Amino acid sequence: MSVKRWIAAGLAATALGGTLTAHADQYSGEKTLGIRAGYNTFNKRPLAGAQFSYRFNRLLRLSPSVDYVFRNDGLDALMIDLNMEFVFPLAQGRCDIYPLAGFNFSSWNYHNTDTAAPHTSEGLTPTDDVSSRVSRLGLNAGAGFGVNISGSLRLSVSATYTFIKEFHGANIEAGIHYRF
């Protein structure tokens, strides 16, 4: 299946999910904002980022996030995700598990690691410029687990695999979020 068909299927699933939000419940409109840290298997380095989520109803949550993958062997990345989380509440809503699916935009940066090259006053080689970036669109699939510690504090753990040309890999992350 081509990337265009995957994107069309994802948009159709999102639109279908939106029809499931017709009836409001106690979860409708719940938002979280948090930070998270983890590990990227492609680059074999830690990552850190921020995540926002908006819950449409008891079963559906939209979760955009931004992560930075730290440099290893002259390669680092900025990753932007837009995921739909399909929530299955456990223990009377105190915790939940959720499969997720969504879209990824990644900008991978190549840095010259040649120590023999002349350096500028900032310590960068002259080849560190925009032409050393590779940006790609991809698809995410994964799962997570969240625990509501209090009315305003939430902890989460998730694992996401990103299907993306040349840069595919998994992200394993833990986060702390403020619920409002």
Image (cartoon, rainbow, N blue to C red):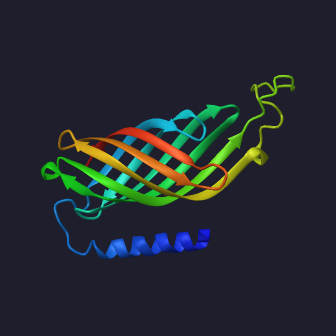
Query: Which residue is outermost to the left?
Result: 92
The location of residue 158, given as percent across then percent down, is: 38, 45
The location of residue 62, given as percent across then percent down, is: 37, 60
Who's the residue at 68% across and 37% down the image? 75
Q: Is residue 107 above or below residue 9?
A: above
The location of residue 163, given as percent across then percent down, is: 56, 56
Compared across the picture, whether 35 is left or right of 148 comes to right
The location of residue 136, given as percent across then percent down, is: 64, 56
The part of the image, by quadrant, that contains residue 173 is top left
Compared across the picture, whether 14 is left or right of 170 comes to left
User: Considering depth in this image, is 158 or 112 the residue closer to the camera?
Assistant: 158
Who's the residue at 60% across and 59% down the image? 137
Q: Is residue 129 above or below residue 120?
A: below
Who's the residue at 20% across and 73% down the image? 23
Q: How many marks?
A: 0
Q: Is residue 83 above or below residue 171?
A: below
Who's the residue at 29% across and 42% down the image? 178
Compared across the picture, whether 125 is left or right of 180 comes to right
Compared across the picture, whether 160 is left or right of 138 comes to left
Quadrant in which the N terminus appears: bottom right
